[in-house]
């Protein structure tokens, strides 16, 4: 993997300088954000005015630019959250608030071998790649060619030259060829159909993480995992984020809140539970 997210210019001091082909986030006086990709012949245009990309190329991020209408805008390289919100997509992406929780609750660590299904538009793929680092590897499965193309394009835009990604056209409901995986992350409507395959593919102690929109899907997944007898510590969380507006004269919660988006369920791979044994972890009711 080459440069970190938003830093396509590579390592060293130059990574904080805008270059040809870099992404840039332009922020106007009201906090509105516009993501652009810099081309020497390009022109940024909005209702606050315009400026040529060539005026920005070669300058450090955080620079203030004056538009043709006299307005001032500040320009940064995008964070991963910026990019995932604004990147081209076919399917709805996993929100940044959930990406962070998936990485922590799913315990995605540097050097891990992680299987992801499905690829979607690549937001989760990007987060996983950054978390596993150059010594880890991400295997991203999807059944649709257009999803694979879109995910690959977005990953390349954010993490150019990521060599630790293998994209696979395949259906994890039908089976998983990879073995001794450290972690598995499923963003699928019926992950219980892949539960038995996940049990075979995960290393001992490996973690299965699933992201689902409804609690009925969560229940079906949890029941399937319990029936298998090779998963324990089945836990579900929901992440709600309420932004606040902090001004000079007032401090109040924002009128808009990103509330429910999905449930994150994790489970750990264990040895088969003995039939009729007395050592099972007590199920909460």
Image (spheres, grey):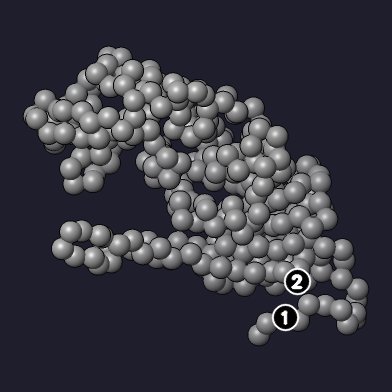
Mark 1 neighbour class, 10 Å CA radius: few under 14, some 14 to 19, many 20 or more: few
Which residue is located at x 90 percent, y 76 percent?
A: 275
Decide which of 194, 88 is in the foreground and name it. 88
Task: Name the spot of residue 75 as percent of width and height, x first.
Answer: 29, 33
Q: Secondary structure at mark 1?
A: loop
Q: Quadrant of residue 119?
A: top right
The answer to whether residue 113 is seen in the rendering is yes
Which residue is located at x 60 percent, y 69 percent?
A: 236
Q: Quadrant of residue 77?
A: top left
Q: Residue furthest bottom?
A: 285
Q: Is residue 117 left or right of residue 90?
A: right
Q: Is residue 209 left or right of residue 276?
A: left
**Residue bearing mark 2:** 226
The answer to whether residue 189 is seen in the rendering is no
Determine whether label 1 and label 2 are within 8 Å by CB.
yes
As drawn, the label of residue 261 is none
Q: Secondary structure at mark 2?
A: helix
Q: Earlier in the sequence, mark 1 or mark 2?
A: 2
Which residue is located at x 19 percent, y 24 percent?
A: 51
**Residue bearing mark 1:** 283
Decide which of 10, 34 is in the foreground and name it. 10
Badge nearest the viewer, 1 or 2:
1
Q: Is residue 199 left or right of residue 212?
A: right
Reply above or below: 217 against 138. Answer: below
Mark 2 neighbour class, 10 Å CA radius: few under 14, some 14 to 19, many 20 or more: some
Q: Is residue 177 left or right of residue 187?
A: right
Reply above or below: 128 against 73. Answer: below
Which residue is located at x 56 percent, y 68 percent?
A: 237
As measured in the structure, the alpha-carbon distance from the residue carrying label 1 to the one carrying label 2 is 10 Å
Decide which of 191, 125 is in the foreground and name it. 125
Name the quadrant of the N terminus. top right
Task: Name the spot of residue 52 as percent of width and height, x first.
Answer: 22, 20
């Amino acid at each position: 993997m080459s440069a970190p997210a938003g830093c396509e210019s590579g390592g060293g001091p130059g990574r904080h300088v805008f270059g040809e082909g870099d992404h840039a986030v332009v922020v106007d006086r009201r906090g509105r954000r516009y993501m652009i990709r810099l081309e020497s012949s390009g022109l940024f245009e909005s209702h606050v005015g315009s400026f040529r990309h060539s005026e920005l190329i070669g300058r450090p991020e955080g620079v203030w630019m004056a538009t043709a209408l006299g307005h001032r805008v500040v320009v940064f390289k995008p964070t991963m959250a910026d990019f995932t919100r604004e990147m081209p997509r076919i399917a709805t992406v996993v929100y940044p608030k959930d990406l962070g929780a998936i990485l922590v609750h799913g315990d995605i660590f540097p050097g891990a071998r992680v299987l992801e299904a499905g690829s979607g538009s690549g937001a989760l793929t990007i987060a996983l790649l950054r978390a596993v680092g150059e010594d880890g590897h991400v295997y991203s499965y999807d059944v649709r060619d257009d999803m694979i193309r879109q995910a690959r394009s977005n990953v390349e835009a954010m993490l150019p030259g990521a060599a630790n990604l293998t994209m696979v056209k395949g259906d994890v409901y039908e089976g998983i060829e990879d073995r001794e995986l450290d972690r598995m992350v499923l963003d699928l409507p019926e992950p219980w159909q892949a539960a038995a395959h996940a049990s075979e593919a995960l290393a001992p102690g490996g973690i299965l993480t699933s992201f689902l929109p409804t609690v009925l899907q969560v229940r079906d997944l949890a029941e399937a995992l319990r029936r298998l007898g090779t998963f324990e510590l089945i836990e579900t969380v929901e992440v709600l984020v309420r932004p606040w507006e902090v001004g000079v004269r007032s401090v109040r919660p924002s009128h808009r809140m990103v509330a429910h988006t999905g449930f994150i369920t994790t489970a750990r791979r264990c040895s088969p539970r003995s039939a009729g044994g007395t050592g099972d972890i007590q199920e909460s009711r």
